[in-house]
Amino acid sequence: MNKAQKKNNKENKNNITNKKLVTFKIPATSANIGSAFDSVGLALDLYNEIHIYENTNSKKIDFEITGEGEEEISKDDNMILSAMKLVFKKLKSKPDKGYIIKCINRIPLSRGLGSSSAAIIGGLLSANYILGNKLSLENEILNMSVQLEGHPDNVSPAILGGIISGVVRKDEDFKYVKINPPKGLKAVVAIPNFYLSTEKARNALPKEISLKDAIFNISRAALLTSALSSNRLDLLEVATDDKLHQDYRAKFIPGLKDLFKQVKMSGAYSVTISGAGSSILSLVKDDEKIIKKVSNAMENSFSKKKIKSEIKVLNIPKKGIIIK
Ligand code: HSE
């Protein structure tokens, strides 16, 4: 038997003997939505999947990774595994069997679409499942993932779905309101072909801001959540204006100013940096012509700067994590 046949044989054997136990689907997210810096985020129906199988050949946790980051993500030391170890520590217990964790990644890495949140949440859920689901999703898992990821506006919509407004920690609890996605609202997302690390994008921000800028953003963030919850989508353009982060981050996203202008002229409700970037989020009416115009405006603005981008038209799902 040659090498390839042996590999094939082993894979077939694994497929027959390894029973699938559970699947987690974790959505992408887009944080900030302009004015609501670090305070509001929404889920997007672009999912990373984690499939857990019994590992009949070993007592270890083995990873298989396909899709986004398959070349970069280590199978021995990754965010999913680190999050899993934290659950083992918290529950003072370890798995007594081996598992295969198959990851199908669709959320691009380091583009402001919540790939780290998805990995951390996926790790916490996987370990919790393996140890008998002792931790609650909306309390302990949410709490731990915020601690690990550091940005509640990213993590909470992935877990809870919809639009999550104001994840505020009060003692041991989180206070937030979930806004159901307004009907007829679509998200057009442009994903440029370059990474932007959150650390780099945060380091570009000033340590202090003026009272004037603070008031500018607070008033618009208040308008944003009211507009989204009362279906006043006509207010989104002004409600997403911001003076706290986007101008400082513009230097990392070539042609951002022109892109914003072109997208607004194409009839979008709003256009903002998605999370810390480098992706762009535009909220638009579910109208084929507008979606096409906005998509073209995004793609053309990037290509004027010789940047390739992928455009995705997405929904804001009502539900966060899907467990099957
Ligand atoms: N609100 C955070 C930021 C999200 O914009 O820096 C980081 O993922």
Image (cartoon, grey):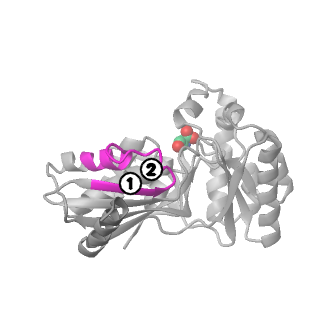
Q: Looking at this view, is 60 or 40 the one in front?
A: 60
* The label number, if any, that marks residue 170 in the structure image: none
Q: Estimate how packed mark 1 is, as few (under 14), some (14 to 19) or many (20 or more) residues with alpha carbons within 10 Å.
A: many
* The label number, if any, that marks residue 121 in the structure image: 1
Q: Which residue corresponds to mark 2?
A: 117
Q: Tell me residue 264's x, y (percent).
A: 82, 53
Cα distance between the residues tagged 1 and 2: 6 Å
Give, as a three-letter code, the residue at label 2.
Ser
Extreme residue in the front direction = 1
Check disc 1 and report its element: helix, strand or loop: helix
Q: Tell me residue 299's x, y (percent).
A: 77, 53
Give, as a three-letter code, the residue at label 1.
Ile
Q: Looking at this view, is 1 or 223 the one in front?
A: 1
Provide the residue span drawn in magenta. 62-86
Tell me if residue 246 comes above or below residue 262 in the rendering: above
Beta carbon at label 2 within 8 Å of ligand 1: yes
Is residue 268 in sight in this rendering? Answer: no
